[in-house]
Image (cartoon, rainbow, N blue to C red):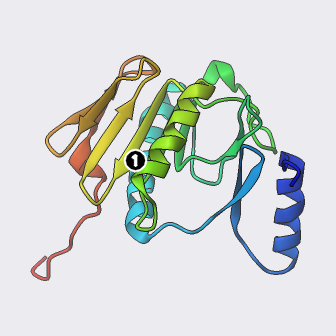
Amino acid sequence: MPEMTVKDVERIESILSDAGFDCQLELEEGSIIVMGPSDIVASEVSLEFASQLRNWVKPRRLGRVFDSAGGFILPNSDLKAPDVSFVLRDRLPRSVRYFATLVPDLVVEVKSQSDRLKKLREKIKIYLDQGVQIAILIDPDTCLLEVYRPDASVQTLGNGDILTVPELLPEWELVVEEIWPVIFEDEE
């Protein structure tokens, strides 16, 4: 079977859209991957992380924050859409109406109910191999974050910890327990 390209992904997305199907596709090693919707916990965690990051980045004009709909064409020709991504401003001074043809500086993947950690860690490795500076894997099931850097180090953070990324975002801090969904009690 021939390897698929980004143009093939665009054609298939157009055909699916015309047929009334709305789905997101990624391209990995010449194969198209259909991305299903996230469960609502993963969605809420992604949004909270992205919101806190964007609220720090935007007023300081440090770069751009994207959600899971933002596609990146990586140097190996894969098309990926991390749950959250960040690009420094000097690398993307203006957004374009197409996929970004660059590697994000920071990517975040949030484990959905149907995801397997092994596959997500493989995806993180691809990001790092392609030039991502920081990759974060968030597991809402265990309330842990795994922070990956190109030197192969992995830092695990949980409740009570603070995430910092001084190499990209000096002074930015994220209190880990603030990204988990709030539980509303009946008495409130």
The quarter in which the N terminus is drawn is bottom right
Look at 52% across and 50% down and name the residue there. Answer: 83
Location of residue 26 in the rendering, given as x and y in whole percent from the top left corner: 69, 53
The quarter in which the C terminus is drawn is bottom left
Location of residue 76 in the rendering, given as x and y in whole percent from the top left corner: 73, 32
Location of residue 174 in the rendering, given as x and y in whole percent from the top left corner: 30, 37
State which quadrant residue 100 falls in: top right
Look at 49% across and 50% down and name the residue there. Answer: 119
Q: Determine the residue located farthest toward the front in the rendered image.
A: 1
Look at 77% across and 42% down and name the residue there. Answer: 99
The amino acid type of the residue labelled 1 equals Phe
- Whether residue 113 is visible here, answered yes or no, is yes
- Whether residue 64 is visible here, answered yes or no, is no
Identify which residue, 160 or 54, lies in the foreground.
160
Is 2 displayed left or right of 126 in the figure?
A: right
Location of residue 39 in the rendering, given as x and y in whole percent from the top left corner: 45, 70
Q: Which residue is mark 1?
A: 49
Identify which residue, 1 or 188, lies in the foreground.
1
